[in-house]
Amino acid sequence: MNILIIGAGIVGFNLADELSQEGHDISIVDIDAEKVKQISEKLDVLWVCGNACLPSVLIQAGIRKAEMVIAVAERDEVNLLVCMLAHKFKVKKRFARLRHMEFTEEDQIFKPHELFIDQAVNPGQIIIEFILKILETPGAVNCAEFADGKILLRGFDVSEDAPLVGKKIADLRAVAEFNSFIIVAIVRNSNLIIPTERDVIQAGDKMYVLIDKEFLPLILPMLNRKINEVQKIILFGANTVSIHLAKCLEKKVPDISIIEPSLEKADHAVDQLSQTVVLHGDGTDPDLFNEINIKDADFFMALTDDDEHNILSALLAKKHGAKRAVVITNDPYYLPILDSIGMNITINPRLFTVGAILKNLRKGQIRSVFKLIENEVEILEIVIAPDSSIVGKKIFNMSFPQDALIGAILRHGEMIVPDKESTIQSGDSVIVVAMPQSIEKIEKIFTKKKLF
Amino acid sequence: MNLKAVFNVVGILLILLAAILLAPIGVSLYYQHAPLDGYFSEVEAFSLTLAVALTTGLGLWKLLPSGVETLRDREGFVIVSFSWISISLFGALPYYLSGVCPVFIDAYFESMSGFTTTGATILRDIDPLPRGILFWRNLTQWLGGMGIIMLSLAVFPALGIGGFHLFKAEVPGGAAVERMQPRLAETAKILWKVYLTLTCIEILLLRFGGMNWFDAVCHTFSTVATGGFSPHTASVAAFNSIYIESVIILFMLLGGINFALHYQMIYGDFKRVYQNPELRFYLSLIGLGVAFAAFGLWWATPEATFPSALRRASFQVVSINTTTGFVTDDYDAWPGFLRLFMLGIMMVGGCVGSTSGSLKVIRILVIFKVIIRELQKLVQPRGVFHVKVGGKTVKQEHILNVIGLTGLYMGVFFVCALLLSLMGLDLTTAVSASTASLFNIGPGLGAVGALGNYADLPHLAKAVVIFCMFMGRLEIYGVMMLFLPLTWKK
């Protein structure tokens, strides 16, 4: 497929990289010569340096042949205009990143398709939804959804007082109510384990669980968590994301504060919020931390646009007693160190955007791919084709790689936790957890056609 | 200061006044009242006034160059102040010439009280007075309610160019009132249409309740303008009808609501009206006030039944709170705490953009919220807190304006009360006369109470009261500006 990407920032770059590897032909346009040069050195794509709002530039980038346009330029205006022009050029699929909340809010004036956009992706919205999901299951550090939100993936920190500690996976299977979920991965001392029956859950583990949406409340007691345990949240930075997040949280959490160093931005935040207390000060000021009693804070969320500032303030906040920290970093290079310095939850808006766009792009057998940051484990959602060779086979009989497992089967809208006797039927979706080295093997198993 | 342009506009307004004077002439011709001994007949008095106003107006308009385009805020304020002074002056002539008020200061008092919709009177016995004069008395309130400048903006669209400066200076609440149409003249027309609609409905409702046409029209004029003049000495008590009292209560309340809201209501935008924070605060304040006064009356006077206490309390609280000043019951005879309460609610008033006077509830709401913010600041010194009304932040400069104005009101109130006591008025009378005139209510307590009037005040005291009414209507700042040397600098 010919795909035209507008904007060669981190999002444009990663999309181009990913899609190019998947076998698509990519053209990329950016107005910044420097960025285009980087792309030209690293990726095998067609690149054009110019203003994407000009039809001539788009033609130069091959829009006439393009089947899809992904507009991820810095400014919303450019992305809107590009999609409109793409519509004129009769491009079938048009994606756009729109940062302004007005375009994606519930009571939007124009729906995206009225603005010639098939799918609008708003990074801020995605971040907010992510944080809200995390808060929905206190103790969660990561989350993803499969099968249109039917099956949830949640990462949890296992605390010492959790009833699960010291239990074997096999023991858990024996208890009926535990049958609604499956532990698909455990991170212990920065090593990732795909658990077998004999593994034991330990305190300090981070475990990834696949669970049916309806059974989500069941899992919290096992981790010694309560639904409404989050009482106090401190946000650092008053920008669109934090203001909207605070607005969403005002109804749910009794005590929300925003710390903002710029008085002008603080004033702007106060204008839009009603219950939230906005404080004028720096997110690295110990006196201020003391004043707002950060010891009691269940969450400290560093949401400014400045990566280093976010990381430092979150470190300090944890030092001063904040229970958990959420950090936004735009630069993906920081991601590997954040977990080891105690940042519980890290959010990378660019990668989130890439993920969201890719998720919407994929319509083949592999429906979605979710990458865990640690060791790059991938979780795939695969739709079983009727003519697949594994239809009717028992899982027990399949020659599955050691470092991969079938996490769940989705059949007729219901999640089934597979055991040895489970069979795979045509029309099922399976969620597979796999280390990168075995992914190729897995793809082969699921896509192999029947011989007769 | 472009004084020539100022007087040019004043001239236009006087011509407008001359045109309006045709109405009382018509009424006088219809009723044909005999002239008082040694004075002009009504028709002659009005015609003479008309002639004088027209000549002066034409002279100012034709002889002085127009400069409406070059008007600035300061000229706006000066024009409004001068117009109100001169229109009250010409409006006083009929009272004086016809002999209803043989002393000129009394005539000027009555005229100023009318145009500023105060409703204070120096007339002892109103019922036997000629009908034309009584009609004029109430017509001045009706004109003053929506504002003479507003009328002129609607009639002479040419004024619209520099008109916003005038608009700001005249409308209660000034710049806070939203412009409903791109053109000021259209806004003024809409406001007058709403005003006319309310007026017509009330006239019909009162007529239906048994009033004659004359009473219905006169009472309507002073109700929707929240003025309070009545062509009867006993005021609304003369009718002793629950129906009439209810209609008047309703229209006093409506007169105290921002006319922009009436306009929205006519166009079915109920949601915005319902969500208007000032309206909600206004209605709840009045509701609480009525409840307090009703229970207070019932509790303090053993012989009163609750329904009668409620009837008297609701009329009187609404009348005083909306700065109308109609009377159905001598609230001066109420127990002490209720008399004090009535004095208190005189300082509340209605909404901005309404016909009511006084401080206006939005300002009280803002001050209330400023206090809350100061308390929050004490608890959380580094917190950023805004004063919000209806979810919207009130700008710092508006807050300062509100606090400044409130302080100014209090200061002027105190100084005037002091001056009045210096002239020999007792404490209750001095304080309440100062309040009732500065906040444009009309009747006060003591000698100027519900059943009393301002006739026995010394002339100098009357002058003080006149000045209070004038300042209250134009919300002090505009009048105070006249005394600022900076205003007059070239």
Image: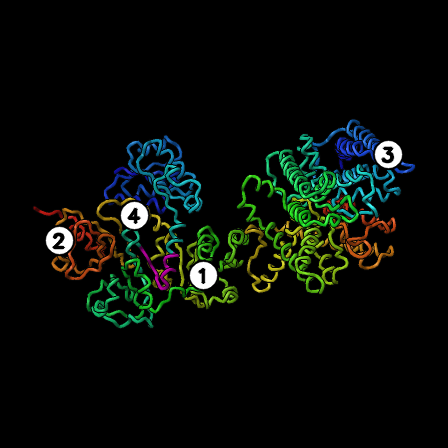
> Which residue is at a point 81% across and 45% down the rendered structure image?
B126
Tags 2 and 1 in contact by the CB under 8 Å rule?
no
Q: Nearer the viewer, mark 2 or mark 4?
A: 2
Q: Is residue A46 left or right of residue B312?
A: left
Q: Nearer the viewer, mark 2 or mark 3?
A: 3
> Which residue is at a point 62% across and 36% down the rendered structure image?
B190
Which residue is identified by label 1?
A: A253
> Which residue is at a point 26% across and 66% down the rendered structure image?
A177
| Secondary structure state at the residue bearing disc 3 | loop
Which residue is identified by label 2?
A: A392
Q: Nearer the viewer, residue B311 or A118?
A: B311
Q: Which residues are magenta?
A: A131-144
**Quick one: label 1 or label 4, which is nearer the N terminus?**
1
Residue A137 magenta-drawn?
yes
Question: Amino acid type of disc 3?
Answer: Ser
Which residue is identified by label 3?
A: B41
* Residue reaching furthest to the front: B210
Q: Chain letter of disc 3?
A: B
Residue A331 magenta-drawn?
no
Which residue is identified by label 4?
A: A359
| Secondary structure state at the residue bearing disc 1 | loop
Q: Nearer the viewer, residue B438 or A331?
A: B438
Q: Are marks 3 and 1 on the same chain?
A: no
